[in-house]
Amino acid sequence: MKPITVCNSCTRHLVDLCLRKSLLFRLFRMPLISGMRIMSCFHGINLDDYPVRTERCRGCIRFMKNALKEKSPAFARLNDWINPYFNRYRDHLVTEDAKARAKSLAAEFMEYECD
C-alpha cells in the first residue's frame, strides 16, 4: 500500500472554484496536469494505488504530485519553479473565505479513515 497523503488544504476545492471563475486558469493548468500525467506514466505512478479518505479525494492530483516529487528530481525542480506562480494565480482568483473553507475541508477529511 502506498503512503497516506496528508492534506492541509483541499486542492480540489480551490481548483474547482478557479475553474468556474476563469477560462485562463484552465488553459494554464491543463498543460501542467498533462505533463504530470505523462511523467506519472513514465515513473509507474498509479493513483488507484493510493488510499483515499473520501470519494471526493479520489483522483486528486495531490497524490500524483507528491509521488512525482519523491520519484523525479526533474519534476521536483520544475515544481519548485512553477508552483509559486500557480499558487499566486490561484490565490488571486479565490477569496480568503474560500481558502479558509479549503483548510477546514482538509481538516474534516483528514479525520476519516482511509479506504
Image: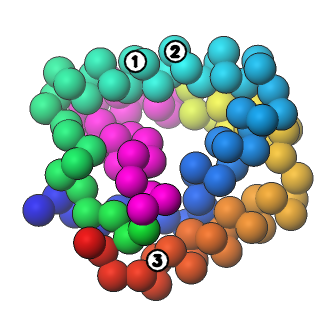
Q: How many marks?
A: 3
Where does the magenta region start and end? 55-81
Q: Amino acid at mark 3?
A: Met
Display colour scheme: rainbow
Q: Which residue is mark 2?
A: 31
Whether residues under marks 1 and 2 lie with C-beta atoms below 8 angstroms apart, the answer is yes
Q: Residue at x 60, y 62 (%)?
A: 9
Whether residues under marks 2 and 3 lie with C-beta atoms below 8 angstroms apart, the answer is no
The mark that comes first in sequence, 2 or 3, is 2
Q: Nearer the viewer, residue 80 or 3?
A: 3
Q: Position of residue 62 (x, y in %)?
A: 43, 48
Q: CA distance from mark 2 to mark 3?
A: 29 Å
* One can see residue 6 in this view: no
Q: Residue at x 59, y 59 (%)?
A: 10
Locate residue 26: give its quadrant: top right
Specify whether residue 115 is painted magenta.
Answer: no
Q: Nearer the viewer, residue 15 or 7?
A: 15
Callout 2: SS: helix
- Residue 35: mark: 1
Locate residue 28: give its quadrant: top right
Quadrant location, the C terminus: bottom left
Q: Nearer the viewer, residue 55 or 1?
A: 55
Q: CA distance from mark 3 to mark 1?
A: 28 Å
Callout 1: SS: helix
Q: Residue at x 42, y 68 (%)?
A: 54
Magenta stretch mostly in which secondary structure? helix
- Residue 110: mark: 3
Label 3 packing within 10 angstroms: few (<14), some (14-19), many (20+): some
Q: Amino acid at mark 2?
A: Pro
Q: Is residue 106 above or below residue 94?
A: below
